[in-house]
Image (tube, coloured by chain):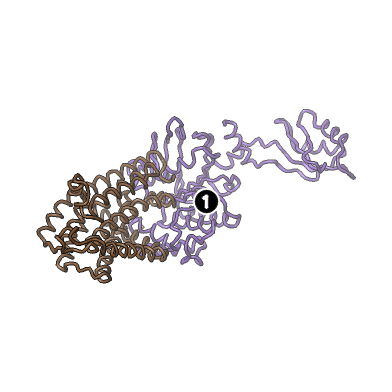
Chain colours: A purple, B brown
């Protein structure tokens, strides 16, 4: 066993291997030399702002779109050369909401897609029932998909992606629009699937969900890889120097004189400014050389009581913004 | 991943799944099934009244054939063509607009099977609908068809199916590429049907229509089926009709499959398969 969050199996054997993948649409270069390697049992998160090229990259991984440069192999099969064979080894969870036949039941939908892999109806039904239970839809087996909620359709998508026990699972924004409980359920399921040896590519816009979940992270921006490493490595990229403080004096809110005194105590280590109209909340922007603990201690010497101190953004969010918006 | 069949057999077995899927979908729209049959009989009823105005002397057969018998075969084949074509085109369009086409294309299923599978229900249901229509009209309107002509007429209809499928595939490829075009397809179907002599004897048309009808597969099928069902023309004439239809149907089908494959390849290249 590894110490990966997913607890996955041997990570050394790359089940999914994308090398130098490039793609353009007309004059617009959408992907430039993107690499991704995912071993068995590993969860690899793919992050990027809207338009970064994530979905295009996923479509190339699944053979829906042809790459112009580079190549992708799944379980050793070249997706561009032999898409049919490669698709047998990929489970795909699309981000789109409506990818099922609304007039028939969840069970019939899954059985239909199962049969597209060449299995008989009885086996397709058995697999469909099992996966519907796995994703918590056992009560809605015979219900028409058109009557499913958004969250139920997402779980049905997951059931379909897992239907054939693929060695590679490609998941496009599975938790988008889900409530926290629904998102946690999908993540737990993905983690358990990875623990059984499935290589997972997980795209998301929710940065905090990758902490303790993904083994590796790739950040795309404008079609290029701007970061590749672990979640911890990504967090180290953070400068995270903005804080939200709640300050008072011993018996009142800070008036302008008290604020000026506190700001003076900071010197060149940062700036303190009022936030909102309640006279209790302040934004503290620290200079690179400043130490937060020392700054807070010095504020206390001016008679200010620090009631609360919170980072304005998480390290992940800060890193993500540094790796993306700085380029756009 | 156990229990998989391999190769062409596996692909053929998938058609059963498509048929079941579409049967369940259609059964969920019971009102549409009922209204389809009501429309069909309303059409036959209108022509039965028109038939009273048309003297049999104007109909091919030298006065021995009633207009209702003449037009019923035309309605059956033209209806077969129109419904089949419309459903062939809308099948892929629907898959695309529902967002299910991409979901299908990430499975190991060939584009040809997706195309055939999307219309397999109609390829079976529409001929069945045509035959049932002919039988019921013959009973309700007292139209007598030659019993010996049923089997040859069915064979002619069967030979005509690949033509409709091929034309539908070309139309599907057009819709897949341009996202629109069902109006143009409807006009083409109307032009082919109108000049085939489905509703009126060719003798009533300008003289240049008759040569066109003789190479129009709809015209060939309708004329052939009328000869069997009304005239009891026999096997020799049926085989002549089938011999004319086979190459036309075969070429149209091959062109249709090729066009559809090209359209799918283009969509994959551009990455626009899921866009509608």
Q: Is residue A198 above or below residue A245?
A: below
Whether residue A228 can be seen here: no
Number of marks in the image?
Answer: 1
Looking at the image, the residue that sits furthest to the left is B236
Mark 1, Cα crowd under 10 Å, few <14 / some 14-19 / many 20+, is many
**Residue farthest toward the top in the current orientation of the protein:** A268
Q: Residue furthest right?
A: A251
Q: Please state the horizontal and vertical placement of residue B112, each as a whole percent of the image.
A: 30, 50
Q: Which residue is mark 1?
A: A174
The x, y position of residue A113, in whole percent, is 39, 57
| Quarter containing the C terminus of chain A | top right
Q: Is residue B108 above or below residue B61?
A: above
Please name the residue shown 46% across and 36% down the image: A34
Q: Position of residue B263 (x, y in %)?
A: 33, 42
Secondary structure of the residue carrying tag 1 is: loop
| Foreground of the two, B144 or B224 | B144
Which one is nearer the viewer's eye here, A294 or B65? B65
> In which quadrant of the rendered view does residue A14 lie?
top left
Q: Is residue A75 visible?
A: yes
Q: Residue at x 46, y 48 (%)?
A: A170
Residue at 49 percent across and 41 percent down: it is A54
Q: Nearer the viewer, residue B187 or A274?
A: B187
Q: Chain of mark 1?
A: A
Name the spot of residue A226 as percent of width and height, x first: 53, 34
């Amino acid at each position: 066993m590894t110490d990966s969050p997913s607890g996955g199996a041997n990570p050394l054997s790359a089940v999914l291997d994308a090398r130098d993948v490039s793609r353009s649409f007309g004059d617009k270069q959408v992907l430039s030399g993107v690499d991704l390697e995912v071993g068995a049992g590993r969860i690899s998160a793919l992050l990027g702002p809207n338009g970064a090229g994530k979905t295009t990259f996923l479509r190339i991984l699944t053979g829906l779109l042809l790459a112009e440069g580079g190549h992708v192999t799944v379980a050793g099969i070249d997706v561009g050369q032999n898409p049919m064979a490669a698709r047998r080894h990929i489970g795909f969870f699309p981000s789109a909401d409506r990818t099922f036949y609304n007039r028939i039941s969840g069970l019939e939908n899954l059985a239909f897609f199962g049969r597209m892999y060449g299995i008989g109806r009885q086996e397709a039904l058995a697999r469909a029932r099992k996966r519907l239970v796995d994703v918590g839809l056992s009560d809605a087996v015979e219900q028409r998909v058109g009557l499913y909620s958004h969250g139920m359709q997402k779980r049905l998508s997951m059931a379909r992606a897992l239907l054939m026990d693929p060695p590679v699972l490609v998941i496009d924004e599975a938790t988008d629009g889900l409530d926290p409980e629904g998102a946690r359920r999908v993540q737990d399921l993905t983690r358990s699937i990875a623990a059984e040896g499935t290589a997972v590519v997980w795209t998301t816009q929710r940065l905090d969900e990758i902490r303790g979940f993904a083994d590796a992270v790739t950040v795309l921006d404008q079609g290029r890889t701007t970061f590749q490493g672990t979640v911890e490595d990504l967090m180290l990229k953070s400068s995270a120097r903005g804080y939200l403080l709640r300050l008072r004096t011993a018996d009142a809110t800070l008036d302008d004189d008290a604020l000026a005194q506190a700001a003076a105590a900071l010197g060149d280590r940062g700036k303190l400014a009022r936030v909102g109209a309640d006279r209790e909340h302040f934004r503290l922007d620290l200079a690179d050389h400043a130490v937060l603990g020392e700054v807070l201690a010095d504020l206390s010497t001016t008679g200010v009581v620090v009631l609360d101190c919170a980072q304005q953004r998480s390290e992940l969010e800060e890193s993500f913004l540094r790796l993306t918006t700085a380029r756009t | 991943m156990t229990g998989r069949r391999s190769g062409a057999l596996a692909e053929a077995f998938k058609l059963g799944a498509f048929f079941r899927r579409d049967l369940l979908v259609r059964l969920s729209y019971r009102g549409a099934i009922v209204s389809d049959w009501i429309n069909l009989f309303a059409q036959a009823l209108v022509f039965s009244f028109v038939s009273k105005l048309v003297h049999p002397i104007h109909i091919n057969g030298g006065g021995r054939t009633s207009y209702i018998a003449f037009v019923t075969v035309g309605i059956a084949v033209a209806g077969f063509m129109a419904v089949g074509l419309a459903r062939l085109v809308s099948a892929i369009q629907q898959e695309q607009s529902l967002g299910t086409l991409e979901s299908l294309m990430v499975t190991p299923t060939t584009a040809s099977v997706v195309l055939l599978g999307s219309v397999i229900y109609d390829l079976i249901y529409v001929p069945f609908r045509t035959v049932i229509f002919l039988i019921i009209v013959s009973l309700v309107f007292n139209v007598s068809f030659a019993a010996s002509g049923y089997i040859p007429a069915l064979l002619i209809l069967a030979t005509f199916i690949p033509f409709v499928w091929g034309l539908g595939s070309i139309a599907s490829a057009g819709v897949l590429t341009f996202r629109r075009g069902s109006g143009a397809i409807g006009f083409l179907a109307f032009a082919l049907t109108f000049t085939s002599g489905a509703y009126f004897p060719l003798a009533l048309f300008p003289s240049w229509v008759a040569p066109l009808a003789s190479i129009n597969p709809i015209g060939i099928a309708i004329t052939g089926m009328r000869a069997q069902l009304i005239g009891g023309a026999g096997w020799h004439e049926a085989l002549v009709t089938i011999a004319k239809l086979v190459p036309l149907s075969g070429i149209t089908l091959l062109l249709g499959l090729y066009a559809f494959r090209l359209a799918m390849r283009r969509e994959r290249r551009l990455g626009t398969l899921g866009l509608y």
